[in-house]
Image: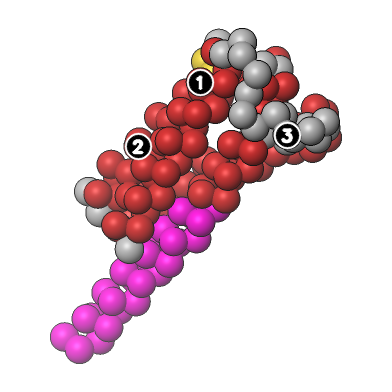
C-alpha cells in the first residue's frame, strides 16, 4: 500500500507543480479549454493564495509530506494529513464551482489524487488494526 501512496504523492507533486507554473505564468495556458475550464483564471484569482503563499505551493509541500510519511510507514499521520488535504481541496473546489464558476483541470486531477490517497490510507490504517487484532487473538 505504501508504494501506491508514494506513487500518488509523486503524481500530486507533478500536478501541483504544473498549477504553480500557471500561477506565475502570463502565457496562454494549455488547460485553457473553454469558458468553464481555465486554469489561468483559477490560478490568478485572489483565491489562489493562502496567507501570501500560492495554494499550488502548499499542494507541492503537502504531497511531499504525504509521500515521506508513507515511505516511513506512518499510517495514521498519512491518514490525518490526507484528510486535511482532502478537506482543503474540497473547499477550493467549492470556490471554483460557486464563486469563480470556472474549473482548473490541474485542481480537479489533484482532488482525485488526494481523494484516492485518503481512501488508500484509510484502508492501510484499517488493515493494520485488523492485523494487530488477529495477532493479539492468537497470542
Horizontal relation, residue 97 to residue 131: left or right: right
For the residue pair 46 and 32, the one nearer the viewer reads as 32
What secondary structure is marked by label 2? Answer: helix
In three-dimensional space, the C-alpha distance between marks 3 and 1, rounded to whole angstroms, equals 17 Å
- The range drawn in magenta is 115-139
> How many numbered marks appear?
3
Residue 83 visible from this viewpoint: no
Q: Position of residue 79 (x, y in %)?
A: 43, 52
Q: Residue at x 65, y 32 (%)?
A: 31
Residue that mark 2 sits on:
65
Q: Position of residue 9 (x, y in %)?
A: 39, 44
Quadrant containing the N terminus is bottom left
* Nearer mark to the viewer, of 1 and 2: 1
* Furthest residue toward left: 139
**How busy is the neighbourhood of tag 2: few (under 14 within 10 Å), some, or many (20 plus)?**
some
Disc on res. 33: 3
Horizontal relation, residue 133 to residue 99: left or right: left
In three-dimensional space, the C-alpha distance between marks 2 and 3, rounded to whole angstroms, equals 31 Å
What secondary structure is marked by label 3? Answer: loop
Compared with residue 91, is residue 39 higher up or lower down, i.e. above or below? above
Precedes in sequence: disc 3 or disc 1:
1
For the residue pair 14 and 77, the one nearer the viewer reads as 14
Precedes in sequence: disc 1 or disc 2:
1
Q: Residue at x 34, y 76 (%)?
A: 130
Amino acid at each position: 500500500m505504501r508504494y501506491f501512496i508514494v506513487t500518488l504523492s509523486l503524481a500530486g507533486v507533478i500536478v501541483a507543480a504544473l498549477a504553480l507554473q500557471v500561477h506565475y505564468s502570463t502565457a496562454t495556458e494549455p488547460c485553457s479549454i473553454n469558458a468553464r475550464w481555465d486554469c489561468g483564471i483559477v490560478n490568478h484569482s485572489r483565491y489562489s493564495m493562502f496567507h501570501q503563499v500560492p495554494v499550488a505551493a502548499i499542494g507541492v509541500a503537502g504531497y511531499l509530506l504525504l509521500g515521506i510519511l508513507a515511505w516511513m510507514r506512518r499510517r495514521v499521520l498519512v491518514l490525518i494529513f490526507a484528510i486535511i488535504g482532502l478537506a482543503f481541496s474540497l473547499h477550493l473546489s467549492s470556490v471554483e464551482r460557486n464563486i469563480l464558476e470556472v474549473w482548473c483541470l490541474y485542481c480537479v486531477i489533484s482532488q482525485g489524487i488526494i481523494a484516492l490517497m485518503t481512501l488508500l490510507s484509510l484502508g492501510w490504517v484499517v488493515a493494520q488494526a485488523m492485523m494487530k487484532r488477529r495477532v493479539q487473538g492468537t497470542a
